[in-house]
Amino acid sequence: QQQVKQSPQSLIVQKGGISIINCAYENTAFDYFPWYQQFPGKGPALLIAIRPDVSEKKEGRFTISFNKSAKQFSLHIMDSQPGDSATYFCAASKRWGNTPLVFGKGTRLSVIA
Amino acid sequence: NAGVMQNPRHLVRRRGQEARLRCSPMKGHSHVYWYRQLPEEGLKFMVYLQKENIIDESGMPKERFSAEFPKEGPSILRIQQVVRGDSAAYFCASSPPDGANTEAFFGQGTRLTVV
């Protein structure tokens, strides 16, 4: 039973384009939704996170859109750059802080010049 | 201000041997989480510990796996009698003791290969 479903599995985007990664969750008890970025051979690093009380959060070129009724959230990377090429994971947990995370399977993003 | 330190970075074990993975949390952090990442998969939660206590081990296999976080020293994930299916990247994350509205920070992982 996969509690957080992520798509697509891989994504190729032209430099300057918009990268969009989608996630859907099942457990309505989830209350915190972070996105992590992972480069090869490294650990995941928190990119941006959202709580269900807002529908959108923006930090620089990264935006999370959140649809509570549909139980879906997505990551948008504007003006994608080759340095953004990495694997992106969505995740969810029942609260923000000191609670285990449930991860999606990841999206491998390649930004080509 | 060192981050979460995991060692070794790479570990090779023969089937049937024991694997010991160590995690030193960030300074001031008293909560530790272990996750396993199989190839082409996301991270799967294994166990959540505070100093000297296991808080949640719902993701731990029932046999051969154990974890501890002693009062002094790093957290240890121990895998006894390893099998090929244990080959994976094991990540540790830590967070501060004050609980709410805090992020967990990940280490760089230990890549275990069972031959």
Image (tube, coloured by chain):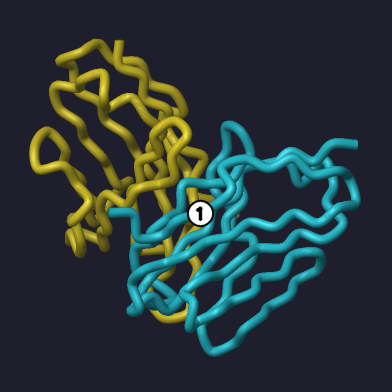
Q: Residue at x 49, y 77 (%)?
A: A70
- Circle 1 packing at 10 Å, graded few (<14), some (14-19), many (20+), is many
Please give the chain letter of the residue carrying mark 1: A
Q: Amino acid at mark 1?
A: Gln
| A27 to A3, vertically: above or below | below
Q: Which chain is yellow?
A: B
Tally of numbered tags: 1
List x then y, in percent, for residue A73. Answer: 56, 69
| B43 to B55, vertically: above or below | above
Q: Nearer the viewer, residue B2 or A39?
A: A39
Left or right, B89 with respect to A10, comes to left
Q: Is residue A63 something one can see in this rendering?
A: yes
Q: Is residue B98 something one can see in this rendering?
A: no
Left or right, A102 with respect to B2, comes to left
Q: Residue at x 79, y 44 (%)?
A: A13
List x then y, in percent, for residue A38. Answer: 60, 44
| Residue farthest to the bottom, as pictured | A53
Q: Quadrant of residue A57?
A: bottom right
List x then y, in percent, for residue A1. Answer: 27, 54
Q: Which chain is cyan?
A: A
Q: Nearer the viewer, residue A90 or A8?
A: A8
Q: Nearer the viewer, residue A28 or B26?
A: A28
| A109 to A92, vertically: above or below | above
| Residue farthest to the front, as pictured | A70
List x then y, in percent, for residue A113. Answer: 91, 36
Q: Nearer the viewer, residue A29 or A40?
A: A29
Q: Residue at x 74, y 65 (%)?
A: A62
Q: Residue at x 27, y 52 (%)?
A: B72
Q: Quadrant of residue A28?
A: bottom left
Q: Does dot 1 land on a helix, a strand or a loop?
A: strand
What residue is shown with label 1? A6
Left or right, B20 with respect to A86, comes to left
